[in-house]
Image (tube, helix red, strand yellow):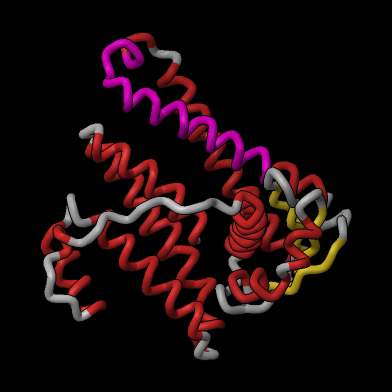
Amino acid sequence: MASRLNCAIGEITADYEGFDLGQATRKVYHLVWSEFCDWYLEAAKPALREGNTATMENLESTLIALLKLLHPIMPFITSELYRGLTGDEKQLALQAWPKPGARDLEAERTFGVVQDAVSATRALRTELALPPQQEIAVELDGQGAKTVMENAGFFSFLSHARPTLGKPEKALAQVTPNVTVYLQPEGDLQAWKERQKKRLAELDKLIETTERKLANAGFVDKAPAEVVEAERERLLDSKAQAGRIRDNLTRFE
């Protein structure tokens, strides 16, 4: 988190100084919500439960930096949170602005590989309608599989899954740039197939409707550009989902 924070401080500061408030807001939102809340807080829980002082101090310093980055666009709530966190009565607007430090690109790469593997595992769990807290067994393959295994404890805590290396023939798969995650379904396989076929039919219908809409020159020429782009992205996403479902069904024929 420290490395990503250092990178973001430089970018967000440049956006503020260039009066690009929209870009700054988007980057701060992503940093706070998608990085800090979604991942760092979750990753820090085991160390916090053990009373790890270094993790607590790092968490506090990171939160202080985030409050400062948020302050220009959310002045009042960040001031109150800063005072409550630090006990400092000096206005947050008068505090020193955070400065970017060194980045650890290898740590960022490692964390990114594990993030992708966790997200892939969660997607497989959702696909099989498995409860979030149910522990499952997954197999990993690809150039990043070793990296995940070296951080197996961290991966298991975030995904509730036990990882091993392997490439089974009959298993659901989620492919990421560095690692492929496999999960072998258990229980009523036929019921799962029927759900997948139903979802596939829905996607095929959506794809047909979207393609027809995008082929309509009247819609493409008259609709706002962002609406047309959203339809194109929906089409790509629907085709990707349909492709994954077909691949998974093929594995179990």
The answer to whether any part of residue 151 appears in the image is yes
> Where residue 95 appears, x then y in whole percent?
20, 62
The answer to whether any part of residue 127 appears in the image is no
Comparing 244 with 203, the one in front is 244
- Residue 119 vs 156, above or below: the answer is above
- Residue 204 vs 41, above or below: the answer is above
Left or right side of 124 for 173: right
Residue 203 figure quarter: top right
Left or right side of 225 for 152: right
- Residue 60 vs 146, above or below: the answer is below
Q: Give the range drawn in magenta.
A: 219-244
Q: Which residue is drawn at 44% across and 80% down?
A: 56
Comparing 123 with 166, the one in front is 166
Left or right side of 213 for 168: right
Q: Which residue is drawn at 52% across and 52% down?
A: 102
Is 120 contained in the magenta span? no
Q: Residue at x 71, y 47 (%)?
A: 175
Q: Residue at x 69, y 72 (%)?
A: 161
Q: How many labels does the image show?
A: 0
> Where residue 182 appears, x then y in whole percent?
76, 58
Q: Is the magenta stretch mostly helix, strand or loop?
A: helix
Comparing 101 with 50, the one in front is 101
> Where residue 249 appears, x then y in whole percent?
75, 48
> Where residue 214 appears, x then y in whole percent?
43, 19
Residue 165 figure quarter: bottom right
